[in-house]
Image (cartoon, rainbow, N blue to C red):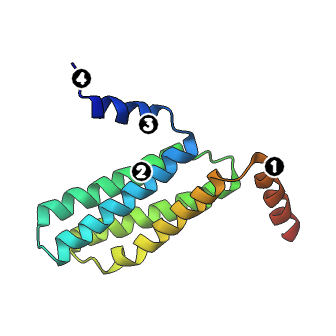
């Protein structure tokens, strides 16, 4: 017999839209970075900090791998993800959470932006894209 909670969790992930998966990944990245900060600063626990920061890097790598580089914004997101990965790696090596604290709000902003996009209709998204193209 399987665990009912684990079955529910698996089903909820399988029925998510791609945007919902991205939002969930941003939330998890934010959580792992926060755990890393706490493990470095508040409760010095090098192994816990290492594990959390590596998980954040892996999630960022998964987001990078899922990018469709034919979409113009993907290049910008890729650069951001690389930057985030590098900051997490440097923080892990140096055991200094200063830079991680700076990128956590950036990850939260991306999550919030994708949340807003997920709530828009296709027509609203297309209209906003057309408006942004007209500004250029």
Q: Residue at x 85, y 58 (%)?
A: 130
Residue neighbourhood size for the residue with mark 2, other residues' Cα within 10 Å, grouped as few (<14), some (14–19), many (≥20): some
**C-alpha distance separating marks 4 and 1:** 42 Å
Residue 86 sits in which quadrant? bottom left
Q: Is residue 100 above or below residue 113?
A: below
Q: Nearer the viewer, mark 4 or mark 1?
A: 4
Rounded to the nearest angstrom, the CA distance separating label 2 from label 3 is: 19 Å
Q: Quadrant of the N terminus?
A: top left
Q: Where residue 25 sits in the image (x, y, percent)?
A: 43, 51
Pointer 3 local density, CA inside 10 Å: few below 14, some 14–19, many at least 20: few
Residue 132 position in % (x across, y down): 80, 65
Q: Nearer the viewer, residue 13 or 86?
A: 13
Q: Quadrant of the C terminus?
A: bottom right
The local secondary structure at tag 3 comes to helix
Q: Nearer the viewer, mark 2 or mark 3?
A: 3
Q: Along the polypeptide, which appears first: circle 2 or circle 4?
A: 4
For the residue labelled by badge 1, is the local secondary structure a helix, a strand or a loop?
helix
Image mark for residue 112: none
Name the mark on residue 2.
Answer: 4
Find numbered disc 2 in the image and state the secondary structure of the residue it sits on. helix
View extreme (top): residue: 1
Disc number placed over residue 13 in the picture, else none: 3
Calculate the distance from the C-alpha at mark 2 to the C-alpha at mark 4.
31 Å
Which callout, 4 or 1, points at the residue further toward the start of the chain? Answer: 4
Whole-number angstrom distance, CA of label 4 to CA of label 3: 17 Å
Q: Which residue is mark 1?
A: 123
Contact check, label 2 and label 4, Cβ < 8 Å: no
Is residue 64 visible in the rendered image? The answer is: no
Which numbered disc flags the more N-terminal residue, 4 or 3?
Answer: 4
Rounded to the nearest angstrom, the CA distance separating label 2 from label 1 is: 31 Å
Q: Is residue 117 left or right of residue 31?
A: right
């Amino acid at each position: 017999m399987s665990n009912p909670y684990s079955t529910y969790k698996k089903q909820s992930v399988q029925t998510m839209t791609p945007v919902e998966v991205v939002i969930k990944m941003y939330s998890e990245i934010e959580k792992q970075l926060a755990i890393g900060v706490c493990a470095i600063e508040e409760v010095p626990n090098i192994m816990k900090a290492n594990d959390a920061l590596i998980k954040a890097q892996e999630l960022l790598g998964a987001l990078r791998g899922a990018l469709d580089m034919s979409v113009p914004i993907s290049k910008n997101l890729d650069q951001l993800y690389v930057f985030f990965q590098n900051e997490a790696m440097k923080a892990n090596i140096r055991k200094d959470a200063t830079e991680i604290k700076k990128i956590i709000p950036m990850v939260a902003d991306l999550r919030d932006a994708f949340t807003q996009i997920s709530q828009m209709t296709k027509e609203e998204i297309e209209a906003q894209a057309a408006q942004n193209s007209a500004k250029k």
